[in-house]
Image: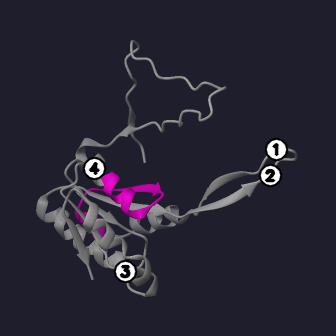
Amino acid sequence: MAGHEFFEPADRRRPVADPTAAEPLAAEEPRHACDPAFKHGVVVGFDGSTSSERALAYAIGMARRLASGLIIVHVANRLPTTVWAGCEPPVFVDVPDHRTEVLGLELACADYLAEVPWILVERGGDICHELEEVGREYEADAIVVGSTHGLVGRIFGSVAGRLAKRAQRPVVVIP
């Protein structure tokens, strides 16, 4: 999604990684400012499943009642793959799953989204962390997620349950 980049003042210096140090400084990701039209909106996790479609329907109604925007978040699966270049040690690279593009096209054609302003945000990583982070960035009034059904959710804990325990804003879980 498009964003605006704010540059730091010239008098503030960033630390430079020392090539001889044991641990180099972690590369900082550039942070883009979110669209002010979606501040205090409703964040909804969406992956195209039946449960997430129900969560999206509820979030649309909630955004309409609040007269706010809808931030649809798809946390993409990153597939680790090994790249080996001759004598160099293998490198692990994240390969996007391209599901976000398909979901974006489906959502763009959906008539039910014409009722509220919305954006689609793609993230990669832990679903709970990314939904909470997007909620923080947009100062969301609520995060809406669908419940997890099945054995995997029972063994490892559902996304909705983990998010409800750690989120700093209201979490609505749709069955």
Quick one: quadrant of the C terminus? bottom left
Residue under label 2, please give it. 84
Q: Residue at x 47, y 64 (%)?
A: 105
Q: Residue at x 32, y 69 (%)?
A: 162
Amino acid carrying mark 4 in the image: Arg
Q: Residue at x 14, y 57 (%)?
A: 67
Q: Nearer the viewer, residue 23 or 105?
A: 23
Residue under label 3, please give it. 148
Could you say whether the residue bearing mark 4 is in a helix, strand or loop?
helix
Counting residues from the N terminus, which is met first, the one under dot 3 or under dot 2?
2
Amino acid carrying mark 1 in the image: Glu
Could you say whether the residue bearing mark 3 is in a helix, strand or loop?
loop
Counting residues from the N terminus, which is met first, the one under dot 4 or under dot 2?
2
Q: Are marks 1 and 3 in contact (CB under 8 Å)?
A: no
Residue under label 1, please give it. 88
Residue under label 4, please give it. 136
Residue 98 placement: quadrant: bottom right
Counting residues from the N terminus, which is met first, the one under dot 4 or under dot 1?
1
